[in-house]
């Protein structure tokens, strides 16, 4: 059923780019919001450094990877070297430290898969989650941000894909669909396949860190790559159409793993991701760029894989035929 013939592109696809661009612009956080985020980071850093002078607080996730919508929660990561203390103890002490500041709704979630402290800052009105020593997330945040600086089409593409995924309820990992992080990686993969983005991890590394035994190395002098994808003139709406067509009809779900680390697809056989192991079913395989044993699609189950593929197909059809794709695409599920 997914082998439908790939038809030629509608001749007028480019005329929808301005309406998709205005949706993108309406989702981008304002400068005021960004300065509030920085203000909160500074306030919390001051408070925490008084108690733990050698610790450092990092912004990560959507606020720092350039793919964040306005009004999204802030993800923070506390990097701290406290050999005597468990993560849970650090979380509890962190919550205690934060009580001294003028902050509200402080909650220590010590039993979550990733233990965090949640809080709200009444000065800025912002809510945030603080995790501990999750430095791989800080590094993958930088990788995503660096990719977004190479070609200015990536950011609007990923915003529209995230907005579509949220409208269609396929951005909920606890229901077996994909995280925002996974969608951004799928966008980068698609643009690599179109030669609009390079593969930074295959180039001579200029940035090099080791986090929990994972070597994270890539070319991060992206200013030197300006104009990399310029020979491809595809507009936003054409790329969206290609993205959804790729996931609806072209990707080989049975055999392939997408890998922005290598800039192409690799085989499931090579990674031994061919069968269910524990809860990892590997029905759609998306390799994490640094933690390469980690399949970002492992949350997808037998039911949600079909929901997801049907949504990709619906989106591809809308971009192909619908008179108002920039409206129909986001109609609530
Ligand atoms: P949203 O706007 O939906 O909040 P987000 O960019 O914050 O989007 P999340 O999927 O919430 O995206 O992820 C936040 C950050 O956590 C990511 O930028 C990434 O660094 C890290 N992350 C999320 N999921 C994973 C995962 N499965 N493996 C590794 N890191 C992840
Ligand atoms: Mg987030």
Image: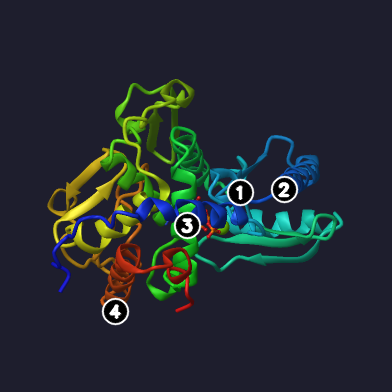
Q: Do residues under tags 2 and 1 come within 8 Å of each other at their CB atoms?
A: yes
Q: Is residue 115 left or right of residue 99?
A: left
Spatial CA distance of label 2 from label 3 is 23 Å
- The residue wearing badge 2 is 37
Disc nearest the viewer among 2 and 3: 3
Residue marked by disc 4: 303
Report x, y in % for residue 264.
23, 42
Q: Is residue 218 left or right of residue 247?
A: right
Q: Are dots 4 and 1 in contact, CB under 8 Å?
A: no
Residue 205 x %, y %: 38, 23
Say whether disc 2 or disc 1 marks the residue closer to the N-terminus: 2
**Spatial separation of the CA atoms under disc 4 and disc 1:** 32 Å
Judging depth in this view, the residue of 196 and 132 nearest the camera is 196
Q: Kindly report the distance in space between the C-alpha atoms of the residues bearing marks 3 and 1.
A: 17 Å
The circle drawn on residue 63 is: 1
Where 326 falls versus 151 (above or below)? Answer: below
Q: Secondary structure at mark 3?
A: helix
Q: For the residue with label 1, is its CB less than 8 Å from the closest atom of ligand 1? A: yes
Locate ligand 2 by image quadrant.
Answer: bottom right
Q: CA distance from mark 3 to mark 4?
A: 25 Å
């Amino acid at each position: 059923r997914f082998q439908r013939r790939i038809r030629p592109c509608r001749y007028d696809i480019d005329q929808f780019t301005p309406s998709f661009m205005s949706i993108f612009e309406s989702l981008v956080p304002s400068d005021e919001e960004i300065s509030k985020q920085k203000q909160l980071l500074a306030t919390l850093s001051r408070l925490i450094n008084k108690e733990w002078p050698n610790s450092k607080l990092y912004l990560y996730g959507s606020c720092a990877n350039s793919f964040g919508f306005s009004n999204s929660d802030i993800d923070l990561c506390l990097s701290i070297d406290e050999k005597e203390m468990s993560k849970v103890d650090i979380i509890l002490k962190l919550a205690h430290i934060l009580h001294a500041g003028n902050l509200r709704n402080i909650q220590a979630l010590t039993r979550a898969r990733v233990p965090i402290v949640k809080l709200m800052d009444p000065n800025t009105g912002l809510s945030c989650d603080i995790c501990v020593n999750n430095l791989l997330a800080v590094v993958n945040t930088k990788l995503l941000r660096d990719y977004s600086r190479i070609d200015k089409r990536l950011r609007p593409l990923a915003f529209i894909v995230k907005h579509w995924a949220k409208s269609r309820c396929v951005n909920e990992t606890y229901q077996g669909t994909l995280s925002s992080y996974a969608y951004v990686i799928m966008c980068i993969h698609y643009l690599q396949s179109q030669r609009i983005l390079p593969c930074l991890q295959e180039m001579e590394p200029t940035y090099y860190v080791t986090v929990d035994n994972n070597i994270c190395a890539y070319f991060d002098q992206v200013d030197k790559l300006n104009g990399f994808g310029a020979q491809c003139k595809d507009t936003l709406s054409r790329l969206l159409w290609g993205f959804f067509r790729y996931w609806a009809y072209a990707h080989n779900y049975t055999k392939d793993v997408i890998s922005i680390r290598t800039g192409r697809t690799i085989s499931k056989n090579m990674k031994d991701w061919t069968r269910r192991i524990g809860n990892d079913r590997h029905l759609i395989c998306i390799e994490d760029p640094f933690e390469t044993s980690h399949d970002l699609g492992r949350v997808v189950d037998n039911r949600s894989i079909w929901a997801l593929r049907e949504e990709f197909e619906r989106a591809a059809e809308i971009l192909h035929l619908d008179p108002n794709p920039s409206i129909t695409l986001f109609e609530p599920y």
